[in-house]
Image: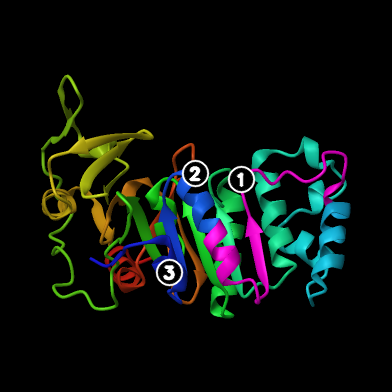
Amino acid sequence: MAEFSSIEELAVDDRSVHIECSRETSAALLAVVRARYRTQRCAFVVETDRGFERDSVASHLRFYGSIARSSVHYEDAISHFNLRGVAKRKMGGLSPSALALVNLARASLFEPEACFLERPLSDLDAEGRAIALSWIAERMEQGCRFITTVEPLREALLMPGVACWHEEGRFIAVDQDDDEDEDGGTAYEGDEVHVLKIPARTETATLLFDPRDIDFAESMNKATYLVVRGERYQTPRTMDELEHELSRAGFFRCHRSFLVNVQKVAKVERYTRNSFNLTLGDAAHTSIPLAKGRAEQMRERYRW
């Protein structure tokens, strides 16, 4: 498992990196990124970006387009980020999702070589999240390096690049799937459903969940969690143990760190040739990473 011992070491790495960290660490990282990339075309989006409340979205982006002097016209940014419906609306009256998209549209005007984004997916609805992830993937393919701070870690795994979490001064990279799967995953043995319960712990009790109620399992920060109706519960099972137990209950190991209940999947999204996500049918339209090495397995298994 790769580690970076300092913010400075993280900043000099050439890969895009997405970090689960505190707001204090995010602010420190922003300062380092500003200093390192001061001679390059950069864009920065932080949580406090609100613009002028009385400005319309169109005038806000027109102003920054005049500063950026790039080949991206502000009208094109409005269309690309699906902001046509709010173009005449005042900045102060935008929904959190629309404001987040405006901030990304503003960043796009600079055609950045390096881009710092603070919690870029947190306020977005499902449609906005798809637009944001598509733009990030496109810019990365064009050579832009992204440094983002996120919460929770799952959002870091939705974006191409290295996902990390911050712990005691170190930045620890999440093990990612490569293109080769040594054993091809747990063998599929038909549609038989096991009668079983999956344990999870709270401070006062051990809960036993029916697999049909579990949306997905995730491994984060050296612990494994079950997500049930939007709530997270720590389980003593490892991801490998859960995969073994739940493979015949309709679960699929879509990523090294994720095991998803396929019955809960509403949509498979592809942003670029090698970038996939699964969107669940829950109220939040939760997105889960689908490793490119497992996308073909999933397609073959379920004939999608």
Tell me if mark 2 has few (under 14), some (14-19) or many (20+) residues whose alpha carbon lies within 10 angstroms of its own: some
Q: Is residue 62 visible?
A: yes
Q: Residue 207: horizontal and vertical position, in percent? A: 17, 27
Q: Of residues 134 and 249, which is closer to you in this image?
A: 134
If you read the primary sequence from the N terminus, does the residue marked by circle 2 or circle 3 appear first? 2
- CB under 8 Å between discs 1 and 2: yes
- CB under 8 Å between discs 2 and 3: no
Disc 3: which residue = 161
Check the image and report above or below for 70 versus 192: below
Q: Is residue 158 left or right of residue 31?
A: left
Marks 1/2: CA distance? 10 Å
Extreme top residue here?
Answer: 204
Marks 1/3: CA distance? 22 Å
Residue at 73 percent across and 43 percent down: it is 50
Check the image and report above or below for 197 versus 12: above
The boundaries of the magenta stretch are: 31-57
Q: Of residues 6 and 293, which is closer to you in this image?
A: 6
Disc 2: which residue = 23
Q: Where is the C terminus found, in terms of image quarters?
A: bottom left
Disc 1: which residue = 47
Q: Residue 88: horizontal and vertical position, in percent? A: 88, 47
Q: How many marks?
A: 3
Residue at 20 percent across and 26 percent down: it is 202
